[in-house]
Each structure stands twice: as C-alpha cells, then as structure tokens.
C-alpha cells in the first residue's frame, strides 16, 4: 500500500459544504496546506470529491523527507529535528527511515503521536499556472511528479 501527498490549491470562497467537510477531514483547512494519506478506497473517494480544490501525487521517500525536514511541526509548534524523531515513540530513529515508512504506507501521519498531520507551505515560486484547469495545463488534479511543486512551495 502506498501513500499520496495532497496539496490544497484553492481557497474556501464559494465552496460547497460537503467539499469543505471533506477537506477538513483531510486536514486541509486552508490554501497551501499539505498532508499525506494512505492509498485506500475511502481516501480515493475523498480525493475525488475534492478534486476541484486539490492536487495530489504519489508520495516518494524524497518528497516526504523534504516535507518532514523543512515543514514538519511537533505539537507545541516545535520544529521536527533528527533528535526529536527518536523521541516520537515509533520504531524509526532517523528522518530518512521515517520518510521511507510514511511513503510506503507502513505508518500514517496521524499514528505518530506528537507530530501534526499537516504541513503549512508557502505559495509556489513562479505560481501555479492556472488554478481552474486540471493537469497538465493547470494546477488541479493528479500529478505524476509532485516533488517539483513541493520544492517550489517549501
């Protein structure tokens, strides 16, 4: 089982309540928030119901490590560091091991006590392109490679 990285692209103006509820369940309350979810039929259904507001792609260990290192936040607004990974109460003692486990679907973000299940990103340098049209011309929908977008937003 793999995982997806999901980034909210559009804001909440004129959003249907059902879509807004789905985005809240995915921890995507604000624009430019990002999360990592498992590849399950339930999550795919949530992604499809919110597809006009998000972009997503497969979670690679490199992309997950980038998010954890640059934007990982512990409860209490403390930055995630190599030392704090060992104290999270998981069997993973380094950041690359944790990133590999999250990308492969071995562990979920919500299962890690003390780690916030979302990443707050900046707007992408040089912009999204269009946030009203799907990939490949716009920013919405499924991406084969989400790492380039994450590098522009971290």
Image: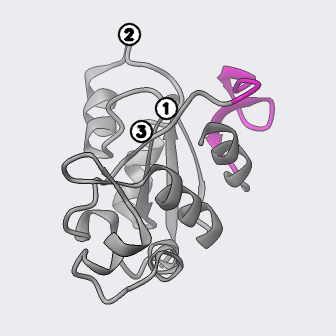
Q: Nearer the viewer, residue 83 or 27?
A: 83
Where residue 123 sits: x, y (%)?
Answer: 59, 27
Element type where label 3 sits in the image: helix
Labelled pair 3, 2 in contact (Cβ < 8 Å): no
Where residue 144 sits: x, y (%)?
Answer: 72, 56
Which dot marks residue 49? 3
Classify the position of the C terminus by image quarter. top right
Where residue 104 sits: x, y (%)?
Answer: 51, 79
Q: Which residues are magenta?
A: 125-143
Name the front one of labels 2 and 1: 1
Circle 1 residues within 10 Å: few <14, some 14–19, many ≥20? many
> In the picture shown, does residue 137 fall above or below 94?
above
The residue at the point 50 percent across, 73 percent down is: 99
* Quadrant of residue 135 within the rendered picture: top right
Circle 3 residues within 10 Å: few <14, some 14–19, many ≥20? some
The residue at the point 26 percent across, 22 percent down is: 17
**Residue 132 forms part of the magenta stretch:** yes
Task: Tell me the CA gap for discs 3 and 2.
Answer: 15 Å
First in sequence: mark 3 vs mark 2:
2
Indicate left or right for 43 with 52 as reference.
Answer: left
Element type where label 1 sits in the image: loop
Mark 1 sits on what residue? 32
Task: Tell me the CA gap for discs 2 and 1.
Answer: 17 Å
Residue furthest to the top: 14
Task: Tell me the CA gap for discs 3 and 1.
Answer: 18 Å
């Amino acid at each position: 089982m793999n995982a997806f990285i999901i980034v909210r692209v559009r804001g909440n103006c004129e959003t249907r309540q059902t879509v807004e509820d789905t985005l809240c369940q995915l921890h995507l309350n604000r624009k430019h928030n990002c999360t990592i979810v498992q590849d399950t039929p339930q999550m795919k259904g949530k992604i499809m119901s919110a597809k006009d507001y998000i972009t997503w792609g497969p979670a690679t260990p490199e992309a997950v490590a980038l998010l954890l290192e640059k934007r990982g936040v512990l409860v209490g607004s403390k930055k995630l560091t190599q030392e704090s990974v060992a104290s999270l109460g998981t069997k993973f003692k380094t950041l690359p091991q944790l990133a590999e486990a999250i990308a492969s679907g071995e562990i979920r973000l919500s299962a890690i006590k003390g780690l916030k299940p979302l990443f707050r990103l900046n707007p992408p340098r040089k912009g999204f392109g269009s946030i009203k049209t799907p990939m490949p011309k716009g920013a919405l929908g499924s991406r084969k490679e989400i790492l380039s977008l994450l590098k522009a937003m971290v």
